[in-house]
Image (tube, grey):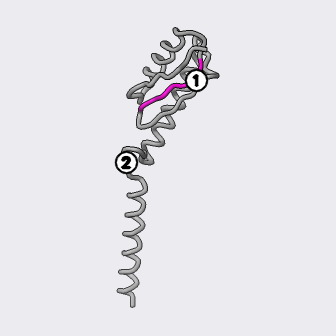
Amino acid sequence: MISNLRRTLSFFMGLLLFVALVACHATPTRESTGEYIDDSAITTKVKTALFSDKEISSSSVSVETFKGSVQLSGFVSNPEEVRHAGEVAAQVDGVKVVHNNLIVK
């Protein structure tokens, strides 16, 4: 009886561990849990850097991050802001590449 209970408990613990590992696994189109947390931190750092920079009208800039790749989108006032925003984002720790899709309005 106790042996069966141990086997059953071991089976369910193994199954639970397997499900947890599979759920955290990254794919080319899906981040792992750790990557999601890292990307959220990168997004926050980039937004903070853009907001702190007085040369950029950051209220119209959107930032998204996927596996360290940052995408800037939205509107700015002039071409210099487009260039400068890309430079500011690229300097943030953890940013691998910046896709600067800002548009001059």
Quarter of the view holding residue 76 = top right
Quarter of the view holding residue 6 = bottom left
Which residue type carries mark 2?
Thr
Residue at horizontal 41%, vertical 33%? 68
User: Is residue 74 a member of the stretch shown in magenta?
Assistant: yes
How far from the left and from the top, in percent, is residue 18? 37, 63
* Residue occupied by mark 1: 74
In this picture, is 72 found above or below 35? above
* Residue occupied by mark 2: 27
Residue segment shown in magenta: 69-75
Which residue type carries mark 1?
Gly
Q: Which quarter of the rendered picture does the C terminus lie within?
A: top right
Residue at horizontal 54%, vertical 29%? 63
Question: As rendered, which of 4 and 85 lies closer to the eye?
Answer: 85
Quarter of the view holding residue 34 = top left
Residue at horizontal 48%, vertical 28%? 71
